[in-house]
Amino acid sequence: MERFIRGFVVCFSLTFFCAPRNGAAMAFPPPWSGPVASSRTLQIGGSSIQVDFGPGSTDLPPDRIVQWVENAAKSVTVYYGKFPVPRDRILVEFAAGGSGVGHGTTWGGVSGFPAFTRVRVGQHTTQQELDDDWMMTHELIHTAFPSMDDEQHWIEEGLSVYVEPIARAQNGLLSPEKIWSDMARDMPQGNPGASDRGLDQTHTWGRTYWGGAQFCLLADVMIRKETHNQKGLQEALRAIVAAGGTIDHDWPITKAFAVGDQATGTHVLTQLYEQMRNTPKPVDLNTLWKDLGVEQMPDGVRLNNNAPFANIRKAITLPPRQVEDQKKPGI
Ligand SMILES: [Zn+2]
């Protein structure tokens, strides 16, 4: 069975750390053979999503757990225009005595499912913890990009880190103020340290998650600048999925970026990758936030609509339908 595993990504909520591994090193029995006590199938975004529940329960009614999965799947559907894979399986395991969401892992090509996610939910998890959770959305975004070699694991994690809050904002679950506040707080963790090298060579937590997220943010802004804000990273990522670039397929990163660039009519992804793959490129975040109109305050951020690229910032979190409406003359 392991030879069918295309790749997988592990995301822990407490430490926010993800360790790339290969199928050969996987423990036996594999996670997808864990016991299932009950099951639901959701039809979302053109996909059939099988949600299996392991033994145990939470203090919350089961419907709340289903709703949490549904919210995440709908956010991903809003961002990508459809759910990225036609069939998906999610195994929710309950941790006795625990609280909160953790230990998310997503694999490609498991037992006939293009994608499989396992996630753990503590017995005493609260509704607020489900509402605040990023992990389920983060995991499902992993389905929407081809599996990479270990050297390019940063783009798998960077994309999930960057797209997750934007997808939730586009779905109305997070405010733009919240996501820009979090990005302004967390993005500096991606800057290279004194001994760090390019993104393909330094695989620390900061460079993998936040270095990858910086790449995505820069690419998004650059694409929007070059296309007069008509296209962004979102269009590139949708095109990659449409070309078959999902987690159950192994692609070289250059192929994914070529497909993305073609969709936006730019060379942003390919050229930015050339600049950042082997060279530790610090990102001038202070200038970027100023240009986008993200002003850091003691209690969060103030969004300045008079900033030179405020329209780019606004377009990034706008639900896609509204983006389309804005392009139509007279609307
Ligand atoms: Zn991840």
Image: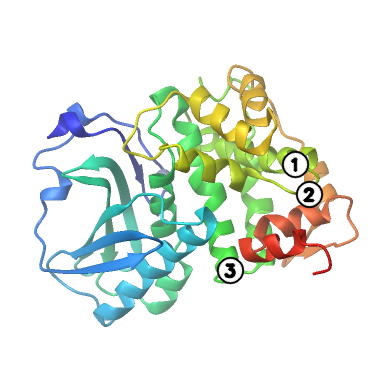
Residue 296 lies, in percent from the top left, at 77, 58
Determine the secondary structure under disc 2. Answer: helix
The disc labelled 2 sits on which kind of residue? Trp
Query: Is the Cβ of the residue at disc 1 closer than 8 Å to that at disc 3?
Result: no
Q: Which mark is residue 174?
A: 3
Residue at (25, 78) in percent of width and height = 62
Disc 2 and disc 3: Cα gap in Å? Answer: 19 Å
Residue 145 visible in this rendered orientation of the protein: yes
The disc labelled 3 sits on which kind of residue? Leu
Q: Which residue bears the numbered disc 2? A: 289
Q: Which colour assignment does the render follow? A: rainbow
The disc labelled 1 sits on which kind of residue? Leu
Determine the secondary structure under disc 3. Answer: loop
Q: Which residue bears the numbered disc 1? A: 285
Q: Is residue 215 above or below residue 293?
A: above
- Of residues 145 and 18, the one drawn nearer to the viewer in this rendering: 145
Query: For mark 3, does the 10 Å Cα neighbourhood hold few (<14), some (14 to 19), or many (20 or more) residues?
Result: some
Query: Is the Cβ of the residue at disc 2 closer than 8 Å to that at disc 1?
Result: yes
